[in-house]
Image: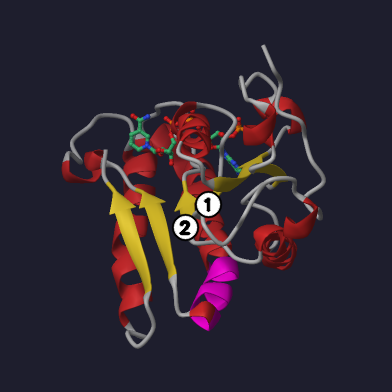
Amino acid sequence: MKRAALVDISTTATEILGVDPLTGTIWLVTGTSSGLGKCLVTSVLSRGDCVVATVRKPSSLDDLALTEEQKGRLRVLILDITDSEENIRKLIGEAWVVWGRVDILVNNAGRASTKALMEEGGLELMRAEYETNVFGTMKVTNAVLPHMRQRKSGLIVFLGSRVVWQANTPVASSYISSKAAIHGTSPSAFSTPAQDRTTNSSSHQ
Ligand SMILES: NC(=O)c1ccc[n+]([C@@H]2O[C@H](COP(=O)([O-])OP(=O)(O)OC[C@H]3O[C@@H](n4cnc5c(N)ncnc54)[C@H](OP(=O)(O)O)[C@@H]3O)[C@@H](O)[C@H]2O)c1
């Protein structure tokens, strides 16, 4: 099995063999160590696009079976979305210059905590859920938006959850409310500067 190399994020487009950033779509996907994020990285590479995939552990994508050509279209960025706004802005800036733009941001990184009764998990659990699912997601989004607004182009995807409409799901209130916050935030955040073509898309599973 071929392994995905962890490549220096500062490598620029011109240094990436065989990739023409003018023809493919450039994706930035958060939380790609497992699950939906990891699957999406494989799908994006399979369709010939380029992707900056964020992980917290450097080795997380080592088990992907990729051709040399596909590896050329993958860059791995170490990013914890609960990091400071300043650090995230800096890292997103680095992601942006790899191929000179990002066409699609997929806010996939998220956590669903150990299930607990509201009073058992308490505010500590709720805060932890919000730090990732809400504030972390918005830190990444806020760091990407100025770049997209400048280009007047971009698509931002939020991973919501259908449990928002099944709020009687037991012992998951912190998770559900954090996803509800994202559902509520994204339309408003994108409705104001309607002159540009930056759009958002929420995925409800
Ligand atoms: N699977 C479902 O049925 C379902 C349903 C509705 C919504 N969703 C949403 O879809 C998204 C992906 O879910 P999944 O099922 O694929 O979950 P998953 O396999 O647990 O993947 C979650 C990803 O988020 C990353 N992550 C967590 N906290 C992070 C942080 N602070 N900074 C950066 N990355 C972080 C994880 O990285 P580490 O490995 O480092 O922890 C992992 O890569 C989530 O937003 C989830 O809420 C999933």
Residue 76 among those drawn in magenta = no
* Cβ at disc 2 under 8 Å from ligand 1: no
* Element under disc 2: strand
Which residue does the numbered mark 1 point to in the structure image? 27
Residue 134 in view: no
> What residue is drawn where x is 44% and y is 32%?
36
* Element under disc 1: strand
Residue 104's label in the rendered image is 2
Which amino acid type is marked by label 2? Ile
> What residue is drawn where x is 49% and y is 41%?
110
Q: Nearer the viewer, residue 89 or 183?
A: 89
* Cβ at disc 1 under 8 Å from ligand 1: no
Residue 79's label in the rendered image is none
Q: Which region shows up in magenta?
A: 142-150
Where residue 62 sits: x, y (%)?
70, 23
In the rendered picture of this protein, how many numbered marks are placed on residues?
2
Q: Nearer the viewer, residue 80 or 99?
A: 99
Location of residue 66 with respect to 147 vertically, above or below: above
> What residue is drawn where x is 29% and y is 63%?
184
Which amino acid type is marked by label 1? Trp
Tell me, yes or no, whether the two marked residues, 1 and 2, touch with CB atoms within 8 Å.
Answer: yes
What is the CA distance from the residue labelled 1 to the residue labelled 2?
5 Å
- Relative placement, left or right, of 63 versus 157 is right
Q: Where, quadrant-wise, is the N terminus in this rendering?
A: top right
Q: How is the image coloured?
A: secondary structure
Residue 33 in view: yes
Going from N to C along the chain, the mark reached first, 1 or 2, is 1
Report which quarter residue 2 is drawn in.
top right
